[in-house]
Image (cartoon, rainbow, N blue to C red):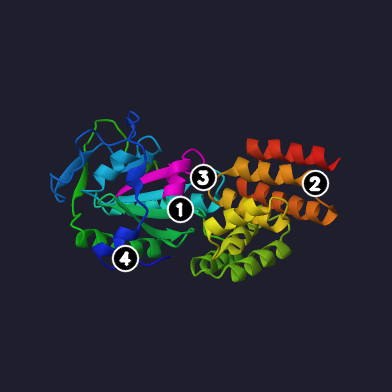
């Protein structure tokens, strides 16, 4: 979990999301026109919203930039195939509900929204960021415990106050309409011991310790599919730890036949939600490799299949293509 910037000036180095093209709102998914306070409207007060929970897209996100002038906007970058995302999502729902309008939550599917994924520089998911006064702030990556999420939110509200963003969202009551938080997923079951240890290790950035915990879990129960997927995910995080996106992509472009360079850039593709790009990159490389290279690519693809989910249609298509190349 990264520390929040200590003062307003430190926000200036953040990614400028205002470059996203302004498009029309998607009906039913964004705040009503004029709800957010702009530069001329003041940054405090109450703003009427239909909910505290929204779906953010490449097409509608500028509306949330406007809203962030009044209320801090928390952004949850997730994907349907991401198991840690499913652990974190109900935690975020509960915490946002408890803050009673002091923050708004926007959920972004990284597979469907590549512009936002790139703008927030999400190298792995789940990733949680915020927007304050139109500017993004990185919060944390990974499924962290609820108490730590609440601590991050406290820091976020302090930063928002320093930037004059102290408004509150008020949800208009609609007769017969269920509360969005009431429809949130139930609290997840407690994790098995080695899984819990792995999550804690990931939270402190000790990916090798997390790998060891998952390997122990698998040794104890080879059928532990959650541990297999977790091992594949944390191994990807470990490989990308400290890597520069620009350097990784440059190295891959300069050495299109270099297996290690192509494996690493495929890791980057997958971690950013570009699942099909990662699959296609390695499957296109596969036929021209020697036996050692083919084994390395096959092993990495099997890891990707676990990360994305064996029931995913993209995995089925890639697995069929890999099988045709093997035989």
Coordinates of residue 1 in the picture (x, y in percent):
43, 65
- Between 281 and 35, the one lying in front of the other is 281
Which residue in the structure is indicated by mark 3?
79
Counting other residues with Cα less than 10 Å from the Cα at mark 2, is it few (<14), some (14-19), or many (20 or more)? few
**Of the image marks 3 and 4, the number of the one nearer the N terminus:** 4
Inter-mark Cα distance, 1 to 4: 17 Å
Name the image quarter holding residue 13: bottom left
Q: Earlier in the sequence, mark 3 or mark 1?
A: 3
Mark 4 neighbour density, 10 Å: few (under 14) some (14–19) many (20 or more): some
Residue at (61% x, 53% y) in the render: 265
Return the mark for residue 5: 4
Q: Position of residue 137 (x, y in %)?
A: 35, 57
**Sequence-earlier tag: 3 or 2:** 3
In the displayed structure, does residue 269 sit left or right of residue 204?
right
Q: Judge by depth and name the residue closer to the eye, 179 or 112.
A: 112
Image quarter (top left, top right, bottom left or bottom right) of the C terminus:
top right
Cα gap from disc 3 to disc 1, whole angstroms: 15 Å
Q: Is residue 66 left or right of residue 186?
A: left
- Separation of marks 1 and 2 at Cα, in angstroms: 32 Å
Query: Magenta segment, which residues?
Result: 104-119
Residue drawn at point x = 59 percent, y = 49 percent: 270
Q: Earlier in the sequence, mark 4 or mark 2?
A: 4
The residue nearer to you, when weighing 113 against 183, is: 113
Residue marked by disc 1: 121
Instruction: Report whether residue 226 is seen.
Output: no
Would you say the residues marked 3 and 2 are in contact, meaning their CB atoms lie under 8 Å apart? no
Location of mark 2 (residue): 288
Q: Badges 1 and 4: C-beta atoms under 8 Å apart?
A: no
Q: Mark 1 vs mark 4: which is more N-terminal?
A: 4
């Amino acid at each position: 979990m990264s520390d929040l910037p200590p003062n307003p000036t430190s926000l200036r180095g953040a990614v400028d999301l205002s470059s996203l093209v302004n498009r029309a709102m998607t009906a039913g998914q964004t705040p009503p026109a004029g709800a957010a306070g702009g530069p001329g409207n003041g940054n405090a007060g109450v703003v009427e919203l239909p909910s505290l929970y929204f779906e953010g897209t490449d097409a509608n996100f500028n509306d949330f930039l406007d809203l962030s002038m009044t209320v801090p906007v928390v952004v949850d970058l997730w994907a349907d195939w991401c198991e840690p995302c499913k652990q974190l999502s109900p935690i975020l729902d509960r915490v946002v509900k408890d803050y009673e309008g002091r923050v708004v939550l926007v959920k972004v599917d990284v597979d469907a929204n590549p512009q936002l994924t790139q703008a927030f520089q999400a190298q792995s998911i789940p990733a949680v960021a915020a927007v304050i006064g139109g500017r993004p702030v990185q919060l944390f990556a990974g499924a962290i415990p609820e108490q730590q999420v609440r601590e991050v939110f406290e820091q976020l509200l302090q930063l928002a106050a320093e930037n004059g963003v102290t408004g509150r969202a008020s949800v208009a009551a609609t007769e017969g309409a269920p509360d969005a938080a009431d429809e949130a997923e139930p609290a997840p079951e407690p994790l098995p011991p080695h899984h819990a240890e792995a999550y804690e290790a990931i939270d402190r950035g000790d990916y090798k310790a997390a790998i060891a915990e998952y390997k122990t879990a698998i040794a104890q129960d080879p059928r532990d599919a959650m541990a297999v997927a977790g091992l594949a995910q944390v191994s990807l995080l470990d490989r990308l730890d400290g890597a520069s996106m620009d350097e990784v992509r440059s190295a891959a472009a300069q050495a299109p036949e270099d297996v290690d360079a192509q494996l690493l850039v495929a890791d980057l593709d997958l971690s950013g939600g570009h699942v099909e790009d990662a699959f296609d990159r390695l499957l296109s490389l596969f036929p021209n490799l020697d036996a050692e290279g083919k084994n390395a690519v096959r092993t990495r693809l099997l890891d990707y299949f676990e990360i994305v989910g064996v029931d995913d249609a993209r995995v089925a298509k890639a697995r069929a293509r890999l099988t045709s190349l093997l035989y």
